[in-house]
Image (spheres, rainbow, N blue to C red):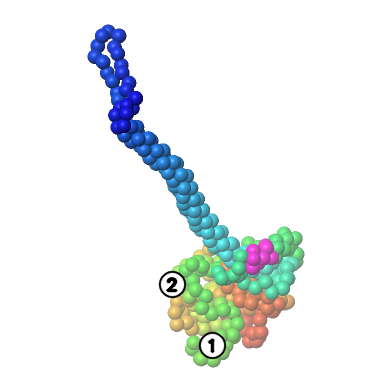
Amino acid sequence: MGVGGGPLWEVQWHSGSGGRLRRVTLTRRGLRNVIIGLAAATLLMLGIMGIIPLGLRGLLQRFSVDSARRENETLRADGERLREAALTLARRTHVLAQRGRRLAWAVGAPIPAAGGPLGRPPGPDAGDGELLGWLSESGTRLERVGGGLAGGGAAAPCPLTSLPSALPVKQERAVQVAQFGFHTSPFTGREEAHYGTTLAAPLGEPVIAPGAGRVVFAGAVRERKANEWTRLGAVVVLEHGGGVFTILGHLRDVLVKRGQSVTRGQRLGSVGQTGWTRVPALYFEIRWPPGDISRPVDPALVAIALTADDLDSRLAKPFGDLPGGFSLLAHLPRR
């Protein structure tokens, strides 16, 4: 051990083979530097050990927030897809329920009551509770419609294969420009009774039989005594049985003749611009037997692909408020 600033310890190594002597001398100053270095290293290690958990905690928190944000975005996207699917389902359910009620009327099956003001499907701004409630109620009503159809009822006036329930032109190729009821005539400017529906379609578009039947008239009506028919130009009239008739007008050409039997979907002619029409169109009228006399009925009650506004009132009054001055089939010349 030294005195003052001299050596404090001296460590010597002596080789057993008589080699060179090795020694290490530690002074007070060197010892102090070692102690200071060890203290600094210790403090540094403690600092690092204190910082590491904070860093890990921050990383974990950031990872958790990012994961939650991604999960919320996924859930939100899934919710929007489910909502859009529910809105689509609501629209389809409404269409099916309306068509089912019309079909029940046409075949003489019991027609379930509307059951209160359910109305049309909720719009995109409706709450989830309102949408789910509407779907639940409309599903119940659709089930009642199916039960009425399955239970049967009074027989349809004509065989189901003859029922004119199909559109005489492809739905995607036609636009309903005039519905059953009163409308303003583009020729006279006056409000007139419209006993059928008018479908605008491309010139030459195929016209098919909406149901099986027999042709009772085919061609243009030219006789003055049948002037009420001349507005329709070239006409085909089908008899389906039981007092049910279909009248198709404004045809460009006619491919069938009187007395011929046709099947549903068979081509009768093509869309034309004959008679009183400003554009290529097809006039489509259905006569229905409320008793011993066949009279015009709203085609949308039978051809269920058509639009039927205010179905409840239409089912209550299928022949509407139209006057009885419609063109009589008996005025068609038999040729």
Q: Which residue is mark 1?
A: 184
Q: Which residue is mark 2?
A: 202
Residue 199 pos. (x, y %)? 51, 75
From what the image shows, is residue 48 above or below residue 280?
Answer: above
Q: Earlier in the sequence, mark 1 or mark 2?
A: 1
Q: Quadrant of the C terminus?
A: bottom right
Please state which amino acid type lies under the numbered disc 2. Pro
Location of residue 317 by image quarter: bottom right
Q: Secondary structure at mark 2?
A: loop
From what the image shows, is residue 33 above or below residue 293?
Answer: above
Residue sitting at x 65%, y 73%: 119
Which range of residues does the magenta coloring cover?
129-139
Front residue of this view, candidates 308 and 26: 26
Front residue of this view, candidates 242 and 10: 10
Which residue is situated farthest in the left direction here?
A: 20
Of marks 1 and 2, the one in the foreground: 1
Q: Secondary structure at mark 1?
A: strand
Q: Are marks 1 and 2 in contact (CB under 8 Å)?
A: no
Left or right of residue 203: residue 256: right
Residue sitting at x 49%, y 50%: 61
* Neighbourhood count class around disc 1 (C-alpha, 10 Å): few under 14, some 14–19, many 20 upward: few
Please state which amino acid type lies under the numbered disc 1. Thr
